[in-house]
């Protein structure tokens, strides 16, 4: 059932997701949305790793383990980032990146 | 397995996103409205200042929950090999939980678990 | 492994002290304890360098890696010496131990990065190093700039990590493994692998803040507390530089033609842009931030040299850079702690009031500029030598031109301190004992690495 879907379909989804994340990171102005974009990028990487592992190298679980670690670390990263965003909101009363910028050249 | 196709699609994906951004930058009408600055642009409209209503305690619980919850993913591979590895696997998971417990004790000490 | 275990034990000890002690003035307990634990870790880890692999080859250590780890530890230790005046302030009283716990955690991460035998281990180390670093950048959480520095660092570091992982997923497609040795054996320089290599290098370039991936650097360096900035610019950069060098030499050795082009481009851009921006900075921290960007460009020259020569010149430069840059940052921290002033103009006439601090800063800046008698000169010499061994004479010419430009801005604070007149110079102040001890160690390090040739010879022998 699974093998009727070719591998490159997964890779296309992963690549598109990654670049949607990049675009979101660059053009969105809300800190939480930027964080969501980063998570999208990391999940795109997860899709790549899992699909490649399942299709091409099913006897080693390297890709699966890498994905587990990416998931766990992304959670740690997200919790720190959200804590920092709360702090930003308390200091600046906004989470719009254009206004969170006291330092200039 | 068509690696060329992947690379081609990768380039096309880059081009699509890039051209959309550039096109929007030059041609899209720019309007500032309230919902643009909300984290979620769908669903029920947010009633007045979404930020003011939540007690910060919610965030504190959510963050602590998030971290401890996700650590559980490491228990799946552990449970898989537990039977073969025997005692050493058990000792390792006890150390793992001791470190997590220390983190919880720290949160407790810092009054992060107290509802303020 | 005992080196990392000792650091982990240090974290646990500090955490237990924080949880169970109710001392009023924690600084006086925690700071000496942390310094002692760090010294002990260096002793335990560095006494008899061990060699071997663990966990099926994903952790490996040898004399060179031990040396790099000791350099990183020395950087952290020197940072500990300069924090006293800042960490004992009332607004930091509820998070004294946390500073040290976070620094120890990042060190464990960097040690694992240095000791990685596998991209997964490297990624874990990288994240363990950079997540606590973002908390450190936002450590002055009541200051707007510090909060801003923290969020800028975590978001840009998360994005760079995503790039790095995306590159690794491409490499995984063709090679089927992420283990360094297996990857080297299975290496095929096809288009997908090269694409992965480019993404990987982009991710690492963010961490080392190479142009054009440097945009976060100046803001984070300026916003973070001075001690944290010193730590950022030296220690966290050093670990990433070593890993990138090692991976390029030993894993992507077959693609040397491809990564050389990238490195040369990055080196030229980084040196030039770092210098040009450093020229116009007024804030001392921002000035040192751009200077450290330019220094990273010089380090890339050493990476271009192959084999032991390139590796030894890079690690030796890191060693010199640790002492030099932390000395400069310590003086900035001392002045900032005592008076709150951070601009170059405020330093005018400093020699008349604080001659000893001025001399330390002068030696550090001379060393950064690469003026002969001090260590920085030899560091740059070995980097140029490594690049010359591969025939990059035009690149060395560019680097020398850049080093000459850098003289101008490195001498600007020196001129301000010695020559410029000032109606109201910064009044005389006495630094605390820790700070004086730290500055003394930095000076000793700068002169020792400059005059004793054993350091370079040892690094050359083990790399």
Image: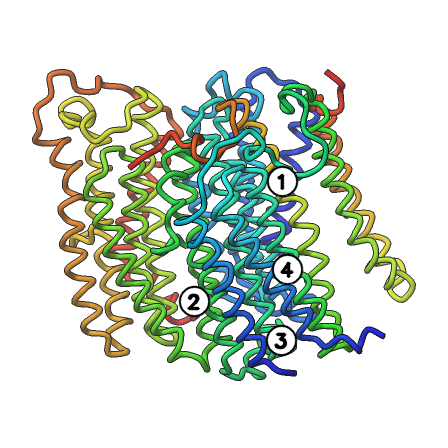
Callouts 3 and 4 on one subunit: no
Above or below C406: residue C247: below
Name the residue carrying label 4. Answer: A44
Q: Secondary structure at mark 4?
A: helix
Given this view, does label 2 or label 3 mark the residue nearer the observer?
3
Q: Chain of mark 3?
A: C
- The part of the image, by quadrant, that contains residue C77 is top left
Q: Chain of mark 1?
A: C
Count of numbered circles in the view = 4
Name the residue carrying label 3. Answer: C173
Packing grade of label 1 (10 A; few <14, some 14-19, many >=20) is many
Closer to the N terminus: mark 2 or mark 3?
A: 3
C377 vs C346, nearest the viewer: C346
Callouts 1 and 4 on one subunit: no
Above or below B6: residue B82: above
Given this view, does label 1 or label 4 mark the residue nearer the observer?
4
Q: Quadrant of the N terminus of chain C?
A: bottom right
Above or below C122: residue C100: above
Q: How far apart in space, not on screen, are marks 2 and 3 (Cα)?
A: 23 Å
Name the residue carrying label 1. Answer: C11
Q: How far apart in space, not on screen, are marks 1 and 2 (Cα)?
A: 29 Å
Packing grade of label 3 (10 A; few <14, some 14-19, many >=20) is many
């Amino acid at each position: 059932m699974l093998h009727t879907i070719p591998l490159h379909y997964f890779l296309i989804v992963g690549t598109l997701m990654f670049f949607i994340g990049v675009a979101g990171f660059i053009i969105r102005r809300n800190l939480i949305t930027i964080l969501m974009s980063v998570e999208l990028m990391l999940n795109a990487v997860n899709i790549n790793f899992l699909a490649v592992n399942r299709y091409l190298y099913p006897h080693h679980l390297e890709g699966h383990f890498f994905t587990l670690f990416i998931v766990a670390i992304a959670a740690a990263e997200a919790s720190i980032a959200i804590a920092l965003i709360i702090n930003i909101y308390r200091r600046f009363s906004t989470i719009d990146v254009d206004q969170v910028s006291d330092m200039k050249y | 397995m068509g690696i060329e196709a992947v690379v081609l699609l990768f380039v096309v994906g880059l081009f699509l996103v890039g051209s959309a951004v550039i096109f929007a930058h030059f041609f899209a009408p720019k309007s500032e409205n309230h919902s643009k600055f909300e984290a979620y642009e769908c669903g029920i409209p947010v009633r007045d200042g979404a930020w003011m209503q939540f007690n910060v305690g919610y965030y504190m619980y959510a963050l602590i929950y998030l971290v401890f919850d996700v650590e559980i993913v490491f228990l799946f591979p552990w449970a898989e090999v537990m039977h073969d590895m025997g005692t050493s696997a058990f000792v390792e998971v006890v150390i793992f939980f001791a470190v997590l417990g220390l983190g919880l004790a720290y949160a407790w000490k810092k009054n992060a678990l107290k509802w303020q | 492994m005992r080196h990392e275990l000792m650091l982990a034990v240090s974290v646990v000890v500090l955490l237990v002290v924080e949880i169970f002690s109710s001392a009023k003035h924690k600084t006086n307990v925690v700071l000496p304890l942390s310094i002692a634990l760090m010294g002990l870790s260096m002793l335990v880890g560095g006494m008899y360098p061990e060699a071997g692999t663990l966990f099926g080859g994903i952790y490996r250590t040898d004399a060179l890696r031990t040396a790099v780890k000791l350099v990183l530890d020395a950087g952290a230790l020197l940072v500990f010496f300069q924090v006293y005046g800042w960490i004992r302030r009332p607004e930091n009283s509820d998070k004294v131990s946390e500073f040290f716990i976070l620094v120890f955690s990042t060190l464990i991460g960097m040690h694992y990065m240095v000791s990685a035998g596998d991209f997964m281990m490297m990624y874990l180390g990288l994240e363990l190093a950079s997540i606590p670093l973002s908390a450190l950048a936002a450590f002055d959480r009541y200051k707007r700039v510090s909060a801003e520095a923290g969020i800028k660092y975590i978001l840009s570091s998360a994005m760079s990590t995503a790039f790095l992982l995306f590159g690794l997923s491409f490499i995984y497609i063709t090679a089927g493994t992420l283990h360094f040795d297996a990857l080297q054996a299975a290496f095929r320089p096809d288009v997908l692998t090269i694409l992965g290599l480019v993404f990987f290098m982009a991710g690492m370039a963010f961490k080392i803040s190479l142009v054009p991936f440097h945009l976060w650097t100046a803001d984070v360096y300026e916003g973070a507390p001075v001690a944290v900035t010193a730590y950022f610019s030296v220690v966290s950069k050093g670990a990433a530089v070593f890993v990138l060098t090692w991976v390029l030499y030993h894993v992507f050795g077959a693609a040397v033609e491809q990564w050389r082009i990238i490195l040369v481009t990055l080196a030229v851009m980084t040196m030039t842009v770092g210098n040009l921006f450093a020229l116009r900075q007024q804030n001392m921290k921002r000035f040192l931030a751009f200077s450290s960007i330019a220094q990273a460009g010089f380090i890339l020259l050493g990476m271009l040299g192959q084999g032991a020569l390139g590796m030894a010149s890079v690690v030796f430069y890191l060693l010199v850079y640790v002492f030099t840059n932390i000395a400069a940052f310590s003086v900035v921290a001392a002045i900032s702690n005592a008076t709150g002033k951070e601009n170059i103009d405020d330093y005018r006439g400093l020699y008349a009031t604080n001659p000893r601090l001025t001399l330390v800063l002068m030696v550090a800046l001379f060393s950064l500029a690469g003026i002969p008698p001090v260590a920085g000169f030899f560091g740059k010499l070995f980097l140029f030598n490594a690049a010359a061994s591969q025939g990059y004479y035009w690149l060395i010419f560019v680097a020398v031109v850049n080093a000459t430009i850098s003289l101008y801005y490195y001498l600007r604070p020196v001129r301000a301190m010695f020559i410029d007149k000032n109606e109201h110079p910064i009044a005389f102040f006495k630094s605390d004992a820790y700070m004086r001890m730290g500055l003394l160690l930095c000076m000793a390090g700068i002169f020792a690495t400059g005059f004793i040739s054993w350091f370079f010879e040892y690094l050359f022998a083990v790399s």
